[in-house]
Image (cartoon, grey):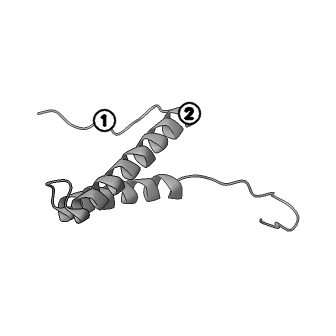
Amino acid sequence: MASYNRKFDLTIDDLALIEGALHRKKTELSMKRLDAISGSVDVEPQEIDEELRDITGLLGRLHNQKVFYRPKSGVYVGG
């Protein structure tokens, strides 16, 4: 039986490309959902909502794995 590969060799650029594609797909689905609400598309908004939740969750997990710059010494002033 086949199993999943648990080790990925992706670069920062690869992840940025994936993240950008997910944002574009999320935008397309959001527009499609608006059309579904207005009745111009024959799709249930609930079907689109599920996929939007999945994409939003994945984008959140990607964001939470990022390491943002913080100086090792001194006071950090953000913004």
Chain-order first, disc 2 or disc 1: 1
Q: Residue 56: x, y in percent?
A: 39, 58
**Residue 13: mark in rendering:** 2
Q: Nearer the viewer, residue 22 or 62?
A: 22
Q: Residue at x 50, y 33 (%)?
A: 14
Q: Residue at x 62, y 53 (%)?
A: 67
Q: Residue 40: x, y in percent?
A: 21, 55
Residue 75 shown left or right of residue 30 in the figure: right
- Tell me the element at label 2: helix
Question: Split into 4 quadrants, where in the image is the C terminus?
Answer: bottom right
Residue 1 shown left or right of residue 76 in the figure: left
Q: Residues within 10 Å of mark 2 (few under 14, many from 20)?
A: few
Question: Split into 4 quadrants, where in the image is the N terminus?
Answer: top left
Residue 25 shown left or right of residue 39 in the figure: right
**Residue 67: mark in rendering:** none
Real-space Cα separation, disc 2 to disc 1, in angstroms: 21 Å
Q: Residue at x 39, y 36 (%)?
A: 7
Q: Inspect the image, locate mark 1, and give the three-letter code of the amino acid beneath it.
A: Asn
- Tell me the element at label 1: loop
Q: Residue 16: x, y in percent?
A: 53, 39
Instruction: Find disc 1 in the rendering and name its residue.
Output: 5
From the viewer's perspective, is residue 30 above or below residue 5? Answer: below
